[in-house]
Amino acid sequence: FSAGLLASDHGAELVTGDELCQVAVELQIPSLAVLAVELVGASRLTGLVAYCEAHAKLGGGHAGDGELSERLLQVVMICEDAASTHALLDAIRVFAPGSGIEALVACVASFQAYMYGKARRALEAFLAAVEDVSEGGDELELSLEWYRKAGWKSLRRVLAVAPTRYEKQVLLELVAGSGAWRVVDQGAPEGEVGLGVLWKIHASLAGAGLGEAVEPDAAPEVIIGMLMERGAFDAARGVAALSGRPHDAITLSEVGMLVAAASANGWMYVSESGSEREGLWRQCNEVFVKHETSPSHAGEFFYSLADSIEPQPGPDELLVLYSLALEWFTAGAGSEGGKPVAFLDSLQTEVWTLTYLPESYN
């Protein structure tokens, strides 16, 4: 092999570096990939991928699918324990010492060994290497986009498999403190929450005394649901804002809790003369205004109450409900989800009738 010769049915033929790398994988002899690079002219990326796929602790003799860069990414993603991570790190140091991918894997290896200071230095080295990578790639022909994606997948995976809340928190602190999230979050799939956002959410919850309520890497939807159950609606809206989620459902839940509390207390706003709950509805309206609820949601809340609450509202209370609904629906006229003009005219007529001819509703 060192002479670049391989026996075949047609005698001894000169083999290419790529062919020798393929043999390395099939025979599970990683050292052949080294020879392919050093003696037969295979690229360093080809050799590295073949070495990993031939290694028992990495590829196990199975070639991956897709381009070489994607196959290397697949190898990086399977390194969940110290043994496989160190095997990959050793391979990278053979083919690409001092590279950005070496720094990234070294960060993971140091974190797995609880050497957090060393992990941070390796992460900073990764960021420095990425900064030097042009869009055309580096010595391994890996692009800036690849490094962003590899950084995201590696760190997100480490966060997911970290066994304790403390380790998850430390990793997020490393990512936030080093500024790595600015790079790796650009490699996150569309719709995924970035590591920087997760850190900001965790920090905001810790500041509100709720840091121990959920796992640091919990999905925003899970965190928001937990906060709503606890009645921490402002904190829930904060998480929604940080993660780019809509907050109307949170405000509607808060208002619904106000209504439920009043109902449980025998309608605290009921007077001796009848079901005058106007104060409660105006309080709900203040909540909607304060948190900039969409007109369609706020309007529908008040409009639907007219037919759903018990005891049935009288003319005075109905006037309050319809007036508030009309105010919100009018504000949303012409926008997506807005009410048609005919509906608004009809509701305006109802408000006018309740204002000047309330006896018609008795």
Image: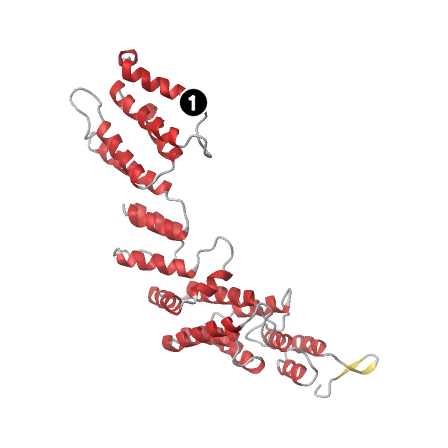
Q: How crowded is mark 1: few (under 14 residues within 10 Å), some or many (20 or more)?
A: few
Can you see residue 153?
yes
Number of numbered callouts drawn: 1
Can you see residue 309?
no
**Residue at left offset 41%, top offset 20%:** 345
**Residue at left offset 33%, top offset 66%:** 166
Question: Which residue is under mark 1?
Answer: 343
Which residue ends up furthest to the left in the rendered image? 272
Q: Which amino acid does label 1 sit on?
A: Phe
Quarter of the rendering occupied by the C terminus = top left
Where residue 1 sits in the image (x, y, percent)? 71, 85
**Residue at left offset 70%, top offset 79%:** 17
Where residue 7 sits in the image (x, y, percent)? 78, 82
In the picture, measured across the screen, residue 314 lies left or right of residue 139, that is left
In the picture, measured across the screen, residue 47 lies left or right of residue 167, that is right
- Against 362, residue 231 (above or below) is below
